[in-house]
Each structure stands twice: as C-alpha cells, then as structure tokens.
Image: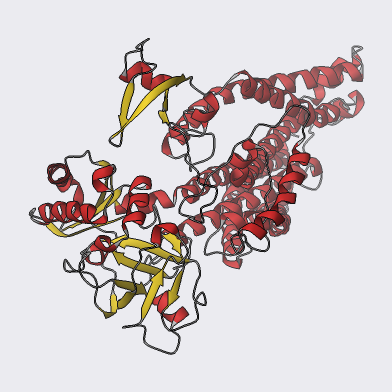
Amino acid sequence: MALISQHLWQRRFASDPQILGKKITLDGEPHTVIGIVAEAPMLREIGFTSQVYVPLQIDPNTHDQASYLGVLARLKPGITLKQARSQFEASTAEYRAKFPGVLEPQESFTAKPYREEMVGGDRRLLLVLSCAVGLVLLIACANVANLLLVRAAGRQREIAIRTALGAGRGRMIRQLLTECVLLFFAGGTTGLFLGYGGMRVLLAVNTADLSLVGTGGANVSMDWRVMAFALLISLATGVVFGWFPALAGSRADLNSVLKDSGGRSGTGVRQNKARASLVLSEVGLALVLLIGAALLIRSFAALYSVNLGFDTKNIVTMNIALTGPKYSKSAAVANTVRAGLARVRSLPGVVSAGATCCLPLAQGTYDLGFDIVGRQAGSSKGAVGWTAVSSGYFDVFKIPLKQGRTFNAADDNKSPAVVVIDESMAKKYWKNENPLGQQIVMGAGLEMFKSEPVRQIVGIVGDIRSEGLGAKPRPIMYVPQAQVPDAANATFQRLLPVAWLVRTQGPSHALIPAIQEQLRQATGLPVTDVSTMDQVVWAQTGRQRFNALLMSIFGSTALLLAAIGIYGLMAYSVEQRRQEIGIRMALGAESHDVRNMVVRQGMQLALAGIVVGLAVAWALSRSLESQLYGVKARDPLVFIAAAIVLIAVALASVWLPAARASRVNPIDSLRCQ
C-alpha cells in the first residue's frame, strides 16, 4: 500500500480520478495506491517534500538499532504537555529494564512541542541577531534624537516668540512631538521598502539552514504582521526619542533668547550634556556590535581553515541510488561499483576514483560497536565510526597511510575479511601494542551483523574530520565495500545512495559530464547530487558565514552611525563656539592649540563610550559562545582590535571639525558679535 502526494498525483498521473486501487512500482516492488495526501504548508516550511508514503514496518522484539525514528503525536483534548511528559518519564524505567544499556544514565523519554523541536537549535542565534538589530535601532534613534536636540536649539527664538504670542508649553510639546513622530514614521516606511530588498538579497546569498526558512528563504515574506510591527516600532521610537527634544525645545524663555543676541559662547561639550550622553551611548553600543562581528568573523576563519585530514582540491562527488532486490547482496553492489570505477578511471584527466556509503562531512559515519579478539567480550565496545569504502578511496582523498596497506581489488567477498582503522582508534584501543594483525568482530548483538566475520587489521590511516569541520576526529573503522554483510548492505543501500568520488588533474567541472555519462552506462541509473568537495566544505560553514555576514553588516552600520554622531556633535560644538575660538586666537592661541583642544574634547567623549562598550561587551560575550569555534568569547585580541578600530574612526570624525576650528578667522568671528 502507498499514499501519494497531491503534487505527485497532479504532475505524474495528470490528476487521474481513477488512481485509487492502481499499482505503482517502488524499488521494484508493486504498491497499491490507497489515497492522495493534501499539501501540508507546515511540512513544506521545514523542507519535508516526500511524495510517496508507505507503511512503517516495525518489529517490537528486535534489538537492531540500524535506524532511528522520529515520533510525532497529537495530544488528546484535555491532556497537557506536562501530563504527557510525566507519562513518558515514568516509562523510562520500564524501557531500561527491557533494553538494558541502550539509554545513557542521564537520558530519559520526554515530549516537547513540535515547533520548539524545529527551531530550538536556532533560538539562541535568532535571539543574538534580534539583540543586534535592537542595538542598531538604538544607535540610529540616538543619532536622530541628537539631531532633534540641535534642531530644537536652533528654533529657540521661534519657540520663544510663539510662547509670547500665547502658545502654552503643552501645545509646543505636542507640536514638536508630532513632528518627531512623523519623521520617524516616514523613516520607518522607507525602511520597509529598503528592508524588503535587503531581505531578499540576504536570503538569496545564504539562509544558514535556519529552520522554517525554506530553500533560498522561500518561506520568508513581508506580510501585514511584519509591516504593522515595523510601523508600530517606528511610532514607538518616535514618541520615546522625540519626547526629550520636545521637552528641551519647549523651555525657551523670550527674555533670555532676545538678550542672547550672539547665543554662541559657552556652549561647548560640557554644556551639551544631553547630546554628549547620546553620542557616548552610540559609541558604546557600536563597540558591542563590532566585537560581536569580530568574534564571528574569527570563528568563521578558524572553522574554514581547520585541518580536515584529507585534501578536497579537484574532487567531484555524485550519488547513485543502488536500491531494489538486484542490489540486496553486497557482491552485486561491489560488481557495479567496480564496473563504474573502471570506466571512470579510463577517462583522460582522472587521477583516481573511489566510492563509499558515507561521504565525509555530508553523511559522516555510522556508530558501531566492536570486540577485540582475545579480550573480554564487550570491553572494547564504544561509539566508533564505521564506513564501507572501495579501493581507491584513500587515494582520492590523499588520506595518509601510517602503517600496513589499504584496500585493493582483491579484497572481495571471497578473500579473508580485513579492516583498516585510523590513528585515533589505534591509540585509544591499542595504547601499548601494534594493532596490525589484531582481529576484531563488529556489530555484536545487531541482527544485520549476525553474519559478520572476524576481521584482521591490515592498515592504519590518518585521522579525518568526517562528522563536520567543528567536530574532532573520531575513531573510524573502514571495511571493503565487497565485504559488507548482506543484511547490513540491504539496510544501508535502502537508506543511502552510493557516493562516487573522482580526483582530477585540474578543475573538476570540465570532466563532470563525461563522468556522469560513464556512470550512467555502467549502472543504467540516474546520477544525482553532483558537487565538488570544496562545495561540500563551503556548505559546512554556511551557518558561520551567515552569522558573520549579518553581524558585520550590523557592526559596520553601527560604526558609521557612531562616526556620524561624533562628527555631528563636534561640528555643532565648533559652530556654536566660533566666538569663543575667535577670542582665544585673538589673545594669542595658535591654530594647533585650538585643533588639539577640539580633538581632545571629542576623543574624551569617544574614549568614555569605548570604556562603557568594553564593559558591556565583556558581560554579554558569553551569549555568543555556542556560535563560536576556535576563539574564546572574551578573546583579548578581538576586544583590543575592535577598540582600536573605533578609536581610529572617532579620531577621523573629530579631526574634520577640529581642522575647521583651527581655521577660524578671529576678525570674522568677533564681527558677528
């Protein structure tokens, strides 16, 4: 029996109304179509695109752990999640008694919401990115508030006259606040359009395999809820950050304003405490984002430069699914692999070729226990990697041979059973002796390995990072593809396609069509998932690249806004102090004295913000630990480098107003008075 999806029914069977009861062939076996499954938006969101569903065959009495199942359940009406968890936890003891040794001491059955299971691993990342967005928003708002304070100061005379004509302070506050809110609302509306374009570009570049995002960010869109939230935030920030400028601007006194005809003396940084405080906060927040971006960039660089233990250059990989009764025996798989490799190796430009069940960095390896012959049974069982490979596998990846030999064409199902192990396994289980010549038995107690022979260790190879760039090398056992037990072969061929690996003399792309054609002729089956090993490695760093890219954008934006804030404050201060500067120069002050005075005052403000930012970043850096690799969350080099960059930007921002101040003409500035 089988269920087919609505999409498959429409595309493959032309919406045939008589499809029910007809037979379709899956892996050479007939199945009767008993129903059509409607499209499920939630399943599409998580990338679940199965087109055919067949009954799951479960033997409740088996001890075979070759496959792991995900269990979904819908709670009955009136049953809470807490009640379900308590029932699962209570069943743990019974399971341990029936299947001893399967669960670790700290493990227990439990239940969790489906959505939480899907996004749980991304929760911390999304929280960090949300905080980064919030910090950029605060910096931008602080900049706008600073500009509004300057604008309010420039409108003192206007506001004083309005007040003299009868306008109350409350009315002036409402007017100024309304102007602020309209300004923020207009900015938010513009930001919606810019944000939509930026979102599409960013998701097209990389989605970092975030849950529920979909391929290329297909499930992410800007609906009415996003728009309403953005506009609401714009209005809220307009009210919050426009309130203080409105209060400050509404305090204008007519007598004071009219008496202060110059209105520019004594309005330095110390007198502009509100504006200085906003700029200080901008600098501090910008430094926090810079440090976060630097940590993630260093993490990405460390991950991408890690020593894999094998060479990925000029290697192309592609898959062929050898399924069905024809390939239930390992000998049939080995013969097909041998024929395919012979054809590929005959191509000009091919250096070496091999095949495996489990591509490093993609499928990794299987966990399998083993016993060492001559030792107590069970004493050497552990989480050891297991993978089946053909001859030529180690040559393709240039995995170094440390002792003994690797596999060749003579290691088939009729020759003595052999195994190659890596250095990690040799050091862990044969600390004081040479493992070459030792014998092991794999998969004791597993149904599909019941015919597993005693194997002799014939070689030791170098360690590789098969499970991922960030994972440490683990003990691995390599067995010849032709010597895999038939029961295990049937299981693995059903679960995974055969991965073909080809090393070429130059770039692999030019030879891909020829390699595909040779494999199609040898197997009669389609070739899928063609990629280079460099692309596989690049895909492994997707999450880190995405994090570093976003934080770099946020950090650069924050740095730019902080520079604008410092420059704006100092430029306004210099303009307001033209009379004071003119008097200083008339009394004998040199140009460099004036320039140094402005630079010193601006840098004091910037350095104060940097100190605050360092303290905040030091406290918050721990939240990034789970996203880092090869760098500490409180790496001194990152903190120092980020502070130096911000000091340099602040100095450049201060230098321009300082240079302008040093060119003030005393006669012109005093004539204004």
Q: Is residue 470 left or right of residue 107?
A: left
Q: Looking at the picture, tell me which residue is in the foreground, 304 or 268.
A: 304
Q: Is residue 616 above or below residue 418?
A: above
Residue 318 in picture, x, y percent from top left: 26, 47
For the C terminus, which image quadrant?
top right
User: What residue occupies the far bottom of the structure in this picture?
Assistant: 432
Q: Quadrant of residue 466?
A: bottom left
Count of marks overlaid on the render: 0
Q: Is residue 618 above or below residue 117?
A: below
Q: Is residue 662 left or right of residue 268?
A: left
Residue 250 in picture, x, y percent from top left: 86, 25
Picture colour scheme: secondary structure
Residue 598 in picture, x, y percent from top left: 68, 52
Q: Residue drawn 36% across and 11% down?
A: 18
Q: Residue drawn 72% across and 29% down?
A: 76
Q: Is residue 422 left or right of residue 339?
A: right
For the N terminus, which image quadrant?
top left
Q: Looking at the picture, tell me which residue is in the foreground, 317 or 455.
A: 455
Q: Residue drawn 39% across and 16% down?
A: 20
Q: Is residue 535 left or right of residue 551?
A: left
Q: Looking at the picture, tell me which residue is in the foreground, 60 or 280.
A: 60
User: What residue occupies the far front of the structure in this picture?
Assistant: 61
The answer, for residue 467, to whether it is visible in the render is: no
Q: Quadrant of residue 303?
A: bottom left
Q: Looking at the picture, tell me which residue is in the foreground, 17 or 666.
A: 17
The answer, for residue 454, to whether it is visible in the render is: yes
Q: Is residue 636 above or below residue 329?
A: below
Q: Quadrant of residue 373?
A: bottom left
Residue 34 in picture, x, y percent from top left: 43, 21
